[in-house]
Image (cartoon, rainbow, N blue to C red):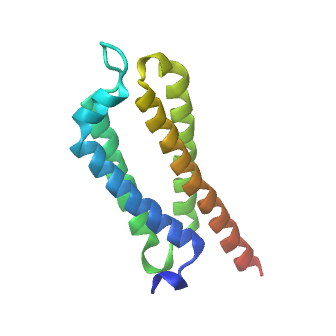
Amino acid sequence: MNLSNRSLLNKTFLADGAFSLVAGAALILAAVPLAALASASATPLVTPVMLKALGAGLLIWGLFHLSAARNGGPVTASARISIAGDVLWQVASLALLMNAYAFLSTAGIALVVVGMIGVADFLFFKLRGLARERNAAIA
C-alpha cells in the first residue's frame, strides 16, 4: 500500500512513529549536552539519565506507532492508546513547566514547549483521522 492510499490516521501514525524514533535516538545520543542545555541551576533538574530514559521511551513509542500502522492502519484501540499517550504528554509537560520553571534554562523551556506543540499537532491529526474513520464506517 503506497502512502497516497493510506488514511489520515495511518499517515499520522507513520509520521509519529518516524519522528519518535529520531527524537528518541537524538535524546539517547546527545543526552549529556542536552541536559546541560536544558538545566539552569547548579543542581541540574534534567540529567542525562533522565533524557536517555525518555529517549528509550520514545523509541518504544515510535515502534508502537509503526507497528500499528502496518497493513492498512491502526485499529481503534491503538488509536485510543496513542491519543491517551499524547494527552498524558501534554499534562506532564505542563506540570514540568509549572513545577520546575525556575530550574530550566530558556532553552530547556523552549524544548518543552516545542515538544508540546509537536505532540499537539500529532494529537490533532489522530483525533481528526479517527473521526473520519468512524464517519466512514457509519456511512
Q: With 98 as the anchor, is 108 left or right in this view?
A: left
| The quarter of the displayed image where residue 47 is located | top left
Looking at the image, residue 134 sits to the left or right of residue 49; the answer is: right
Residue 43 coordinates in the image, percent (x, y): 31, 13
Q: Nearer the viewer, residue 125 or 39?
A: 39
In the rendered view, tell whether residue 44 sits above or below residue 131. Answer: above
The residue lying furthest to the front in this view is 106
What's the residue at 45%, 71% (across, down)? 69
Residue at position x 74%, y 74% from top? 135
Q: Is residue 36 above or below residue 132?
A: above
In the picture, which quadrant includes the C terminus? bottom right
Residue 56 appears left or right of 3: left
Residue 4 percent across, percent down from the top left? 52, 83
What is the x, y in percent for residue 113?
52, 38
- Judge by depth and name the residue closer to the eye, 119 or 108: 108
Q: Is residue 21 visible?
A: yes
Q: How many marks?
A: 0
Residue lying at 40% horizontally and 66% vertically, measured from the top left: 66
Q: Quadrant of the N terminus?
A: bottom left
Residue 74 in view in this figure: no
Give the quadrant of residue 88.
top right
Furthest residue in direction right, as rendered? 139
The residue at the far top in this view is 42
The percent coordinates of residue 31 (x first, y second) are 25, 37
Q: Residue at x 37, y 19 (%)?
A: 40
Which of the 4 quarters of the picture holds residue 51?
Answer: top left
Q: Nearer the viewer, residue 91 or 102?
A: 102
